[in-house]
Structures are given as C-alpha cells and as structure tokens.
Image (tube, grey):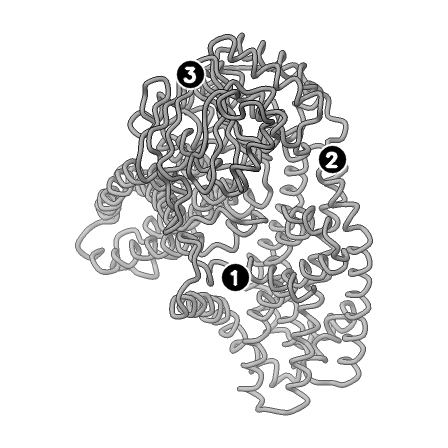
Amino acid sequence: MVKTLVKKQMTEIFRSYIINPKTNKLRSKGSSIGFIVLFVFIMVVFLGGTFGALAMTMCGVMTSENLIWLYFAMFSILALALGIFGSVFNTYSGLYLSKDNDLLLAMPIPASVIVFSRLLSVYLMGLMYSSVAIVPAVVVFFIVNGFSLMGLVGCITLIFDLSVVVLVLSCALGWVVAKVSRKVKNKSVVTVVLSLGFIGIYYYCVYNAQNVINDLINNAVVYGESIRKYAYVFYVLGRVGEGKLIPMLAVTLIVAALALLTWKVILSSFFDIVATSKSIGNIKSKAVKGNQKSVFAALLSREFDHFKASPTYMLNCGLGTLLIPVSAVLVLVKGNELGQMFDNMLVSYDSMGVLMACVVLCMVATMNDSVVPSISLEGKTLWIVKSLPTDLKYVLYAKIVVQLILTVPALLLCEICAAIALRMSFLQTVAVILFPMVFSVFYALFGLMIGLKRPNLTWSNEITPIKQNISVLIVIFAGWGYAALVAGGYLLCGLFIDVGNYLLAVTLITAVPCVFIYRWIKKVGPAILAAL
Amino acid sequence: MLVIENLTKKYGEKVAVNDLSLHIRPGEIYGFIGHNGAGKTTTLKSVVGILKFDSGEIFIDGNSIKDEPLKCKEKIAYIPDNPDLYDYMTGTKYLNFIADIFKVDEKKRREKIDEYAEIFGLSDDLGAPIASYSHGMKQKLAVISALIHDPKLIIMDEPFVGLDPKAAHTLKEIMRKICDDGGAIFFSTHVLEVAEKLCDKIAIIKDGRLIRSGTMEDVKGDDSLEEVFLELEG
C-alpha cells in the first residue's frame, strides 16, 4: 500500500519527465532521459556550480585556520535556508490541499500511509534543494583536504541530518499556516503574507550573504568563537561534517526525535485539518449583486479570481509584482552607484549601466509567469469555457492581459525610477521604457504558446502545473536567455552604436516574434484549447 | 430544435458513436439511455460543441455546431455528469460570470438567481466558495447557471445524480415547465423510472449505435421501459 501511494506521488512529481502532457502518452526513453539530464544539468551546473565556487573560496581559508567545522556550519545554514525555501511552499498545499485527499481518506488506507507518502515528496524536495548547497561543499572539502573514511561518514550523516531538519522545519511552517488559515476568512491572504514574510527574510539574508561571507573569511577565528559560544547547534553540525563520532550520534538522535515529534503532530492533526479546510463555516450570504460586465471583463475577472484564490499560484507566478516595485526603490537608492560601477567596468561602451538596468528589469519581470500554467490550471473545469458562447481566443487574451496587468504598471514605475537615478537622456529614457514593455509582451505571448503546446489537465494538486512543470522552466530560462542575449549583443555592437539606439533597435526586433506569436495564438490557439 | 444527422465519433480505432441520427422538437423532453460506455456522454458533448466529431452534422435551432458554434451555444445550456466548477469562486461569482458571458442584464440575473437559489435551497450558501460545496450543491449550482439565460435547449448528462429527492423533484418540474414554454431538453439518465415518467420521447443507444427511438409508446409498447431496455441491451 505504501509502495503504491509513494509510486503515485513520485509519478505526479516526475510526470512531465515521463509522460508527454500534450498527448498524455509515455515519452520515449530517450526523451525522458533528455529531460532528466536537462534538469540535473540546471541543478548541478547552475545552482551547484554557484555553491561550489563559494566553497572553493572558503574551504582553503577555513582549513588553514583549522576551522573546518565552521566551514561545514556555514554550508549547513545555507543548505537549510535553500532546502526550506525550496520545499516550504509545497508543504501546506501538498499535505492538506491535494484534491485526492478525500478519495484516499475514503479508501481503506491508514492516514499514516497517506501522510507518509505526502511527506516523502516534501522530504525529497528538501533533500534535493539542501543537497545543491551541501554536496558541492563536501566535494570541495575532499578535494582540498583529501579523502578519509570518517570524513565521508560525517559528510553523509550531515547531508542526511540536514535533509531531515529541512523536512521538520517545512512541516512545522506548513502546519502553522494550516492552523492559522483555517481560523481566518481569507486564507489566501494569510498564506501569502506569511510566505512573503519568509521570502523577505530569505532575500535579506541572500542580499547580505556576500558581505557576511567576506567578513567571516577575514575574521574566521573571532566568528568561530562566537558561534561556538552563542549558536552551539551550528558548531555541533560543523563537527558532524568533520566526521566526529559523538556529535554525529548526538545530532542524528536529536534530529530523529524531532522527526518523530513532527510525524506525531502532523499525523494527529491531518484528518482534522483536511476536513476543516473544506467546511463552509459561518459565511453569511449576501444579496446577489449583479453588476453586468462585458464578456472580456468577465473572463479577465475569472482569471484574477483564480490567481487571488491560490497562494501557490500567487507566490510562484506573481512574485514579480512585489519585487519590481522593491527593485524600483533599490534603483532610486543605489541606481546611480550601480550604474557608475557598470560604466566603469566597460568604459569603451556607452552607458553600460543603462543597458544593465534594462536587462535586470527584464529578468525581474520574468518572475511573473502566471500565463504559463494557466491553461493547465483549467483542469477539469475546461468544459465550462468550451461550452460557453464565447470565442476561445478571448479566454486566451484574458490570460495574457492578467500577466501584463501584474507586470507592466510595476515595471513602468521601476523604469521611471531607473531613468531618474541614472540621469538618462530622453532617448535612453524612451528606450528603457519601451524595451522592457515589449519584452513583457513577448514573455507573456511566448509563455502562453508554451502553455498551450504542453498542457497538463489531469493533475490532483495545482502544485503540479505551477511548480512541477517543465514549461515553466522553459519559459523562465528562455526569458533569461533572451535578456542575456540582449546584453551580449551590446557587447558585440555597442562600440558602434549608442545604448539608446541599440535598445530601440532591439525593441523593434523583439516586436517581430510578438506579432508572429500573437497571430499564432489568435489562429491556432483557440483550436488547440477546443481540442483539449 | 436539435437535429443530429449521422453523427460518428471515434477515439482512435474505437467507434464511440456510430452514424447516430436524432431529431428533437421544441416542447420535447428527450431521454437518452444506454449502458455505461454506450456513447451517451460523447453524443451530448458533441452536441454542445466541446468535442469534435469525425462525421455527420448537428444543428441547433437551424445553426450548425460546426460552422456557427457561438450562435448555437447562445441558445443552449449544458449540465455535465460531474459538475467540476471553479472552486476558487463563490457561488454568486460563478453565476455572475455565467450571466456576464450570456450577457444577461443585471435586473434579470438578480431575479433569476434569487428565484432558482430559493427553489433549490442554495440561497444561504451562494456566498461560500464552491470548493466547500458538496456534490449535490455543485449540481444545483450547475443547474441554476444553466437556467439564468433562458436557454432554448438544455443538454443534461445524468442531471439527477447527487440531487436530494426534493431538488430532483423540483428539477423535473422545471424541466417540464421549460418544455411547456417551448424549450427542449435532451438528457441522459440511468434511472429508467424517471425517464419513463418524464420523457416525451426516448432514445436507446448501444455500442455507439441508436437501437431504438421515438415516443415512449413507440419504444416500450405495453411493457415497462426497464423490460424493453434489458431486452434490447441483451
């Protein structure tokens, strides 16, 4: 029974690698392997490479100062942060909001088996993210210090202990969200506010990480003493990484006890929370207000209702709406300084800072990708729009417009801030306003096209189309790639053309695929949607 | 009101509906019965334009569902067998959304929603998210949403499943009234007693083929519908 449920859970997570969402048929072995290799490449090369480089900087210094434990302690903190950040958003919805909870609870399956299978996927997610930080540190440690058996046992124990701590903390946060949200009327808002608070702390740490690391390397002995004195738990974690037997046993026992406690709490409250999450409660019915809207306004409103009702959707596909204005404030405060830094880096080029502002803005804008999973999110309700007397192209347009509404006003604010902070000329200002706008349109159109070509309507938890969706990865990387291409293009031809004219030319070039994709969506999109 | 001519729909090699023809006139309640997998839902989905078919024609009030799908859809309402509605909306929002798409004016939609919500005992729950509704409540909401734009033809797939006896009785009365006012209803059901009492005409489908259709008297003669159905299904 456990095996069956775990298999089902794993199939959901890795569905897009095994099954072609377009045809709902098994992919060929080659295709599956190709997608898995791509995913591993992204995780290992991009994320693992970043942490590997950081480990190379720190490991030698820490070894010479005889502070290997501090090295492992720092990477343990990074692994915990990344692991929790990567899995915490899945925990609440994955545990308590899965559509098949009722079905499984109605079957002769003990709740413990259901909870175990759900927690296993949370654990694997946490293990994956925490490993991305800690495994490169381990590899670098062995490269610098040579291999030892106890070192290997210690590192494996540390990786395991960290992954379990990630599970415990993610579950604790998910449980708190579940407990709080069932007491309040607007659950989505509570979940989003709690999550944003968490994200804020995370980004604060990331923002200050480089300074902290530099400071740490320069004053390793002093900080080592402080951590040993005031944050003993990290000292012990560091000793685990070193391969010290007593810390290994002690930490593993404590972690096992915490995991057991988490298991007991989650299991005892699971049925209660699942049952309450669907109850009507004391909602008073209001008199029916029927403000008539146009068909398009109704479709737009429908998309926004869906977006607002799902914390998972908002946090994963609309974070840019918050971060772009935050970027605007940052640009006002630090823009001039950053602009000058870029200008000084490549003095032969005209206003490198202006170009970089534009490129960075586009990259931040890629955080809003609500349009990509929007087709898949129709799920089993797709019959409604298909049976209504409305041209399906307006359904598609509404999805695009939602993403643009979430992105463009914030982007405009940020562009104006950038123009003020970098003291841009009129031409540069026009270019910096136009290019990210056209880029946003391109990103939304491209996102919808990929969403249409690779739909998955048969999910049981909306995490599947939102997070475990290769289309989302494709679109985000395409957006980043295009922005990087624009920067690279300027390095090639920036000696012959000023930045304002270059950006205007790129704007025009970007508009061309927009026209083609728009025409494709208009002509082919409705037919694809109708055939789903 | 509804003309189905030589409808054929295949799923790969499997023929789900095979050369099916039916005519439903204004004022008729037309029952559609058959065993599981006989092709009922495929036929109904083809009629409402959410499933493409391989050959044949479907006309709704003279308009082809292939060539003028929007004109057809303006005149019909569809209630599926499993009412998967927008969980993220409240009942009121969902009804307003449907009313907006059908361009129902504010006064009329308020009257209709109030009237049908009262009849189906859903008034107190319209402010709640659909996610919290039971299957029966979703079914009632789907029925109300189908009625607010005064459709000429209602297509229903197993409409009584999940409804409590009172709501089922109310729905039957509403169905009769719609047809008395000149509308038409085409619905599938497994409840033969309901079909026998409610329908003016009936069609029996087996393995995608129409094996008998006509008035209740034509189809069953002096036997019960159950006896005829079981004999035909073999």
Residue at 43%, 38% in the rendered image: A403
Q: Quadrant of residue B89?
A: top right
Quadrant location, the N terminus of chain A? bottom right
| Amino acid on which the number 2 mark rests in the picture | Ser
Looking at the picture, tell me which residue is in the foreground, B183 or A54: B183
Residue at 30%, 36% in the rendered image: A522
* Chain letter of disc 1 in the image: A
Question: Marks 1 and 2, Cα distance to the nearest angstrom?
Answer: 32 Å
Question: Marks 3 and 1, Cα distance to the nearest angstrom?
Answer: 51 Å
Determine the secondary structure under disc 1: loop
* Chain letter of disc 3 in the image: B
Which residue is tagged 2?
A: A279
The reply to whether callout 3 and callout 1 are in contact (CB within 8 Å) is no
Where does the image place residue A325, in percent across and percent down from the top left? 49, 40
Where does the image place residue A253, in percent across and percent down from the top left? 81, 74
Q: Are marks 3 and 1 on the same chain?
A: no
Determine the secondary structure under disc 2: loop
| Amino acid on which the number 3 mark rests in the picture | Arg
Give the number of the disc on residue B25: 3
| Amino acid on which the number 1 mark rests in the picture | Phe
Q: Are marks 2 and 3 on the same chain?
A: no
Give the number of the disc on residue A14: 1
Residue at 41%, 48% in the rendered image: A336
Q: Is residue A329 visible?
A: no
Mark 1, Cα crowd under 10 Å, few <14 / some 14-19 / many 20+, is some
Mark 3, Cα crowd under 10 Å, few <14 / some 14-19 / many 20+, is some
